[in-house]
Amino acid sequence: MTLAPGGVLGMILDAKREEVDAARAARPLAMVEAAARQVPPARSLAEALARPAGAAALPVRVLAEVKRASPSAGPIAPGADAVAVARGYESAGAAAVSMLTDRRFFDGDLAFLSAARTAIKIPLLRKDFMIDAYQVAEARAAGADAILLIVAALDDIELRDLHAAAADFGMDALVEVHDEAEAARAVAAGARLIGVNHRDLRTFQMDLGLTGRLAPQLPAGTVLVAESGIRTPADVAALAAAGAHAILVGETLMRAAAPGDELRRLAAGAMEG
């Protein structure tokens, strides 16, 4: 997928470069890396999300997302207590938590990640627009167990380098793709934890069939995560049948009065179906 310079993603990436430059000026990379080396070992996101071989009848894992806003949806849960939501997800059986840390476009904060790390025991993903090794060290220092890498936002060298940087800190990288070409690039970069985002970044249209179409082209042993547009137990069941090990759900949960209870309903309904 080619990025349009004036598109939403291009605008976000421009802002992110400025943000990273400012963060580096305020806190040098060497200082962040030293902090990152002092935190306890990372938990494996891939292991938490993988369904055992031959266990297709078991429920998919849930990577539950703390998401207060987005450019496409606008405000979702303004002012929501990120730590309380993360605790609710863990209590409801989530395998891991995805924490939005982008402030400008998603109403997130890196502080949410570090606070959640002290509150829950399951793996934590830093979900942001990762473009620089500085952010990888920053994520680990804040307690992230894994980072998100968006193939559409990176060239092949950047993708490989950031994937390797995560591994150097003992973190997994969830590598997000939107089409066949991006899936091939992710595999070539060594990704074995791959997220299929059903939202087309150019049109914002949803295509929940994308996971099923991409699954066959991924290497054996890949942990496949279906992302975006998942609203009903029927959606969950269909994605499980298509080969997803896990689902990433945020907006559907965050719009509920009690996100943890909504997670239970979604998962239980999928099993009954």
Image (tube, rainbow, N blue to C red):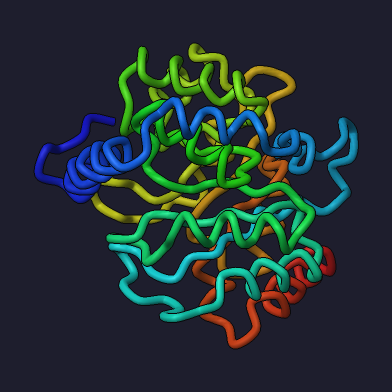
Asked if residue 194 can be seen in this view, the reply is no
Picture residue at 49% right of the left edge, 14% below the top: 189
| In the rendered image, the vertical position of residue 181 relative to residue 100, given as above or below | above
Front residue of 17/271: it is 17
Residue drawn where x is 20% and y is 50% of the image = 8
- Would you identify the image quadrant in which residue 117 lies? bottom right
Residue 238 at x, y percent in the picture: 66, 54
Residue at image point 56% right, 68% down: 231
Question: 1 or 251, which is in the foreground?
Answer: 251
Q: What quarter of the picture does the N terminus occupy?
A: top left
Q: Position of residue 29 (x, y in %)?
A: 40, 28
Q: Nearer the viewer, residue 149 or 185?
A: 149
With respect to residue 10, does 137 lie above or below?
above
Image vertical order of residue 162 relative to residue 214, above or below: above
Q: Is residue 240 visible?
A: yes
Spot occupied by residue 147 in the image (x, y as percentages of width and height) = 54, 38
Q: Quadrant of residue 191?
A: top right
| Residue at x 35% of width, y 76% of height | 75
